[in-house]
Amino acid sequence: MKTLLSVSAGQLPKVVMFDLDGTLIDSVPDLATATDSMLEQLGRAPAGMNKVRHWVGNGAPVLVRRALADNFDHQGITAEQEAEALAIFMQVYGTGESLTTLYPGALDTLKTLHMLGIKLALVTNKPEKFLPQLLADTGMAGFFQWIVGGDTFPQKKPDPAGLLWVMQQAGVTAQQCLFIGDSRNDVLAAQAAHVACVAVTYGYNYGEPISADNPTLVVDDLRELFLS
């Protein structure tokens, strides 16, 4: 428990906010399947899982644009191309997430924080429509008092809007919160909201080490939070 206390000013946080993809779940297999199906329907070559793993993190529209560009830089993709491809991607991805799995320790961490009386929130860039079924399928339904999807507000992470909204709803200060994520977007959003950030090493950070983005703490396993 000392590790958790060390990142929250010596007291248990009142609210812990989580990212989803790359933090609690490994969703790349399903995202890659939907991306490749989309590309093939458009007469393009599939991207494959390794590329998709480096492209995720900024929401479905940006993933689609990167896939169309076959590059992290997607400036050459038009709004019309994005709209056509996004409609296909959303339809395919909406058929299910059978390949998505929980990371080791994810569910145990949620259960432990809940037992400690800490309120939980989810702030993700994944479209909101996919969240209820995904949370139910992975056993995480009911843990989160507040849920913010990638299209809940006009802004996505790294904008802090979702974090600030949760803090306002919970009636807590930044010092009473903790955000847990896996990518640069998560660290930047937490820093902009003045919230301590724990980052996991195993997620999706565009192929770069998350330590380079200077989160408050880096862990290899979420259960490290409860080490004494």
Image (tube, helix red, strand yellow):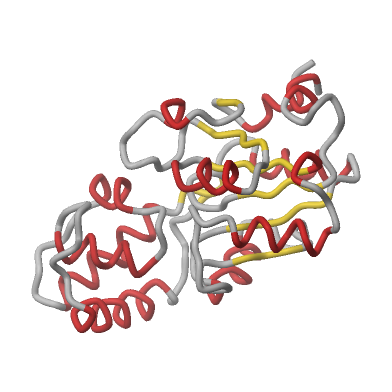
Residue 139 appears in the picture as rendered? no
Residue at image location 41% in from the left, 53% down from the top: 57
Can you name the residue that lies furthest to the top here?
A: 228
Question: Which quadrant of the figure contains the N terminus?
Answer: top right
Image: 214 above or below 97: above
Which residue is nearer to you in this view: 107 or 56? 56
Residue 164 appears in the picture as rendered? yes
Residue at image location 41% in from the left, 63% down from the top: 59
Image: 130 above or below 80: above
Which residue is nearer to you in this view: 47 or 14? 14
Residue at image location 18% in from the left, 56% down from the top: 47
Residue at image location 31% in from the left, 36% down from the top: 207
Quadrant in which residue 198 is drawn = top right
Which residue is nearer to you in this view: 159 or 138? 159
Question: Which quadrant of the figure contains the C terminus?
Answer: top right
Image: 5 above or below 134: above
- Residue 32 lies left or right of residue 161; in this view the side is left
What is the total number of numbered labels drawn onto the structure image? 0
Quadrant in which residue 169 is drawn = bottom right
Percent across and percent down for residue 214 are: 50, 28
Percent across and percent down for residue 154 are: 51, 73
- Residue 90 lies left or right of residue 125; in this view the side is left
Image: 174 above or below 105: below
- Residue 187 lies left or right of residue 177; in this view the side is left
Percent across and percent down for residue 71 are: 17, 53
- Residue 179 lies left or right of residue 49; in this view the side is right
